[in-house]
Structures are given as structure tokens and as C-alpha cells.
Image: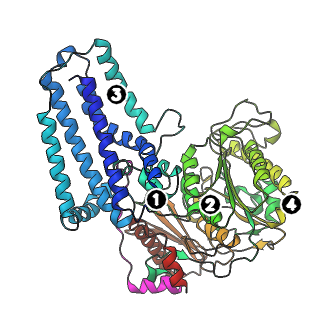
Amino acid sequence: MTRLRTTLELIMAGVLISWCFRTFLYIHYQEYFADISILQFLTSLFHGLRFDLAAVMALLFLPLWIMNLPWKKLERREWIATWRIIGYILLLGYSLLLLGNHIYFSHVKRHLGRELAQMSNDFGLITDMLGSDYLWQSALVIIFLGLAMWLVIKTTPATITSSHVAIRITAFVLIPLLVVLTVRGGVSRGRPMGVVSAFEYGDYRYGNLVLNGAYSAMRSGKEHHVDRQKPNAHIHQMAKKEWGLYSLDTQHPFAQRIEDPRHEPMNVVLILLESWSFKYIDGLSGSGYNVTPNLDSIISQSLVFPRAYAVAQRSIEGIQGILASIAPLPGMPILGEGLERNNLKGIGTLAKEKDYETLFIQSSTRQSFRMESIARMLGYQHYYGMEDMGIILDYPRKEFPRFGWDYETLMLFRDKLSQISEGLFLATVFTGSTHVPYPDIPERFHRYSHDSKEETGFLNTLHYSDWALGEFMSWARQEPWFDNTLFIITSDHPLGAYAMGKKRHEALDDALRIPMVLYAPATLPAGKNTIIASQLDILPTIADVIGYHKTFSAMGTSLLRKQNSFALGTEGNILVGINEHGYVYHSISQKLEHGFFSPDTNEESLQNLEQQLLFMDYAAHSAMKTNTWLIPESQATKDHK
């Protein structure tokens, strides 16, 4: 026995345990994994190795590192045997966690996540199942693990072999490096892997097979628990009659169907603009900054929703609201950090089911925000990032800034659209130059003295980005598909950092109010719709435009049909509800603040807003907790008939 051999033995044992539980998952839930062939299962062992090693190395790091302290006097049987046994005890706990995950999977068809941090609620459910429905299976596993521990103790070698000093030092240095490497998921990734990385290999079922349940639970350990009060029967009736949630009786509250989709589906170009705020766009706010002439011109020819709001203040949360129509609610994981464990359908998936070709391009690197994995998980076939661009303009600095150049991004978008535009397509582009720190741009775009961290720098880059948008749109107007294309122009979130409003509703606008522009001059009459709109409304709007006829789930409503004036947002862990009368800030346990948009608004209208806000939060959280976000198509067809 040597310390190096014992180290490798423990790591291999952890991987073997992981593979056993993955095999058990595949066999036990064969109905769920019915579409996954034996060959795909074998590849899942390889793809899942990254997650297995990340979980095992994080678990074993401390005992392995201590055991491999390079001092010669520690090369004793008692020292190595003690840490070997401690390592196997940890692997015993790891096995029990995977067993609990396996039981939990049977109920919600996803791996453990935030439930690990909510032991008082969900751990009781798991232990109850272990002691009742899965009593004999649990007993067999525990007996087997007990025998395994006995064998570990009995098979500890009586003698050890001393290692060379170079080997001892190398092992001691390499172990922490190996932990960092495995947790990151490799050396070539621009961003450490997350739960969502398991879903970049295929659909959500294959992703759940690849994903390691212990890794999923460890990654979600920081998610916090929020108590939610179950709505009463009166609130349920209001939800059905007033708020349009007609699918409550199916236990899938956000399921909806476009009853009369368009006979001639349109292409869709979705343009997500980094940090573009309502207040800085003259065509919306009339504020006179004079930096968005191209978007101002488009607005004059578009259907505009001047009272539109983001779901949150972070890019990835806004992207989640737009591409999946799910708000980032308190106590719930977000895309890239666990939400993808649920059965979801994103915009790209809906479009692919209608034989659309799907494209996503972002200005920053492919793995920024883990967007490559997220985009593929949400159904996008083609994905490009900064690595796929070359610099075109003569910039003051001959390199890409941290979040990319918008002109180069939109020109790559143009080139890729030229390659896929023979049939119907859904194409999304996400810009980045207007993200702080604001890169210096050619002098001709300067409207103010440039500062990389101040509002003047933002305004200059906003002017540059607006010019780049204008260049792209000038090209698009010449294309044969232009008249049959809907352009949706919005932002991921507002800037919200400068000249914050002194009045609360002005601060609300600074924090969440965004542009929402629908541009299709050949088919969509220009005008203003003052209904309260949301990023959550974009997915159902696209479903409407592409003629999607199946049931899907969304927290929003098609902007072409919306009647209930409502938007749900979050500021940190605080819920924000907005309707035509006013706004409510809520901690879920209590109302924190509210306000009126007009002096003649009564308290009853805001009470209704508060009830709707809390119900939407409760219903979405419940659907995610039970993995009932999507209604099975067989049930949806039956209910529809």
C-alpha cells in the first residue's frame, strides 16, 4: 500500500459508485428513459464522468490532501489506513445521498437541488419514502454498504511501501489542482461548468441521465428556502376568471394554447440589447439624450409597449424570463444553476417543433453566462460567440472588450442569417458593448466625454450600439424575407445605475422598465399599446407568431392578445408586482411597499395586484417543486378536446 495508490483507489471507488447509481437510474426508470438507447446510456457514463469527478473530488479533497502531506514520518500504516477509512466513510455518505436522490427522482423526475438546503421540509419526505415505499431496497443498499465498509477495514494491507520524495511532493501539489480542474469541468471552459452543462449533450432526459445527483445537490446548496402560503379557493377563482390561468384544474397552472394561430407563420428576429433602458431612448421617454436615432426611427413604425418591465436586474435572469417565460423567483434556482433540472420548453424548442431553423449569437464569449449550454438546452441549433468574430472597425484598442463589440456581433448575425434564411427561422442576438466597463469607441460616436464607469461612457456606447443596430436593419430591409419577419427589440434589463429616480415609481422604472418594440411594417400596424407588458410575454408572443398549435407553458401572455395588465419582477429576493394602477413590493411574507400611478386609484385595486403577485409566485414555485411546469401532450390534447 502507498499513499498514491490509496488516493487513486478512493477516486476510482467514487466514480464506480456514481456509475452504479447512474445505471440503476437508467434501469429503474426505464419508462422515463425509454427514448435513450443502450449506446446513448454508455455515452452518458462518459459525459457524466465530469460531474462524477467534480462531486467525488470535492468530497474527498480534505482527507486526500491531509493523507498526502509530504512528510516522510507520515508514511505509516496507521496514518494511511485511518484516512483511507475516513475516505470510505465519506463515500458511504455520498452513496446515501445518491440513494436519496434516486428516490426523490421517482416523484419529480429531476435530481436533488435546493431540497438539500431545505432538510426540514424535503428531507423528511425522502426519509419517509425510504422507510415505507422503498424499505427493502433501502435496507439492501445499507446492508451492502455496511458489508463494503467491513471489507474496506479487513482488506487494509498490513505493510506499506515508501514513496520517493518527488512523488510525495507532486501528489500533495496536484491534489488541490485536480480538485479545481474537476470542479471547473476542464481547462478549456471559459466559465466553470454548472448543472446546465449536463444538458448541452441532448434533451432534458438525457441531461438528467448525465447529471450526477450529488453534484446537482452540492451546486444548489446555497439556495435559500422561502415559506409560501397556499392560496384559498377565492384566489383560485380569481386566477381563472380574472387572470387567465385556465389550466389550474389540470395542476399545470401556466399551460396555455394559441387557439387560432396565424395561417402564415412568420420568421422571428429577437434582438436583446444589453442594459438598454426606457429612459435613455428618446422615442420612448422623450428625454433628449440624442443617442438612439435608429431605434427611434424604428419605434415610429412599430407596435410599441411603452409600459414594459424586465423580470429582474441580472442578464441571465432576464434571458430566462424571455427565452423560457419563467420569472427568477425567490428560493428558486435560475437557468444555469439548477432550473434546467425541470422539464422545460424554451423558445427554440417551440420553433424547432414547427420546423424552424434556430440561431443564437451573443457578443461575449460562448460560455459567458453559460449561454452556450443554456441556448442549446432551450432548443437553439446554431450558436456563436466572440470566438467566432473578427474585428472589423478601427477601434482605439485593437482587441475585443470584455463583453464584445456590437457591430461585429450584428455583422456575424447578418452573415449567419444569410446562410439559414431559405426557410423559416427564429434568430436571437444578444449584444454586450453597453455593459460596464464601457469600452472606448471611435471618436465619431462620442456625444459626451467618455468615462468607462460613468453615465457618459454608457451614452457613448449606446450611441455606437444604436448605429450598429441601424446598420443591421438597413441590410435586413433589403432581404426577401423582411416582409414576413417580426423583429422583437427589447433588453435584458435596464441600466439602473445612474440618476436613480427620487420618487419610488421613478426608481422602479430605473430598475425594471425596458423597451418592448414589435417591428413588422408590412404586417403589423404601428401604434402604442399602454397595457403593462413583461419579458414573460415574449415566448407566448413568438408561439403566436410562428403558429404553434400545441400546449406550452408560460408565465406571460402573447402581446398580440394580452388583456390582463400585469407584470411580475424581482429585485433581489423581493417580488415586484405592477399593473395599470400601481405597484407592490413584497417579501412573500409581508407587503413592503406600494404606490399608485394616479391619485384616484383605490386600495382595492392594489389588493388585487398583491393577490395576483403572490398567486403567480406560489403557482410557479409549486410547478417547479413538483416538476409539473409542462403538461404532458397526451393530457393536453385530451383536455383541449
| Secondary structure under the numbered disc 1 in the rendered image | helix
- 560, 201: nearer the viewer: 201
Tell me the mark number nearer the camera, choosing from 1 and 3.
Answer: 1
Which residue is at 83% across, 60% downward? 297
In contact (CB < 8 Å): disc 2 and disc 1: no
Question: Pointer 4: what residue?
Answer: 480
| Secondary structure under the numbered disc 4 in the rendered image | loop
Q: Is residue 512 above or below residue 181?
A: below
Which residue is at 19% across, 67% downward? 132
Magenta region = 217-244
Residue 631 coordinates in the image, percent (x, y): 48, 73
| Secondary structure under the numbered disc 3 in the rendered image | helix
Sequence order check: which comes first, mark 3 or mark 4?
Answer: 3
In contact (CB < 8 Å): disc 4 and disc 1: no
Left/right placement of residue 156 relative to residue 470 reads: left
In contact (CB < 8 Å): disc 2 and disc 4: no
The C terminus appears in which quarter of the rendering?
Answer: bottom right
Q: Amino acid at mark 1?
A: Arg
Question: Pointer 1: what residue?
Answer: 205
Question: Pointer 3: what residue?
Answer: 175
Sequence order check: which comes first, mark 4 or mark 1?
Answer: 1
Q: Amino acid at mark 3?
A: Ile
Left/right placement of residue 211 relative to residue 420 reads: left
Residue 388 coordinates in the image, percent (x, y): 69, 39
Q: Is residue 578 above or below residue 491?
A: below
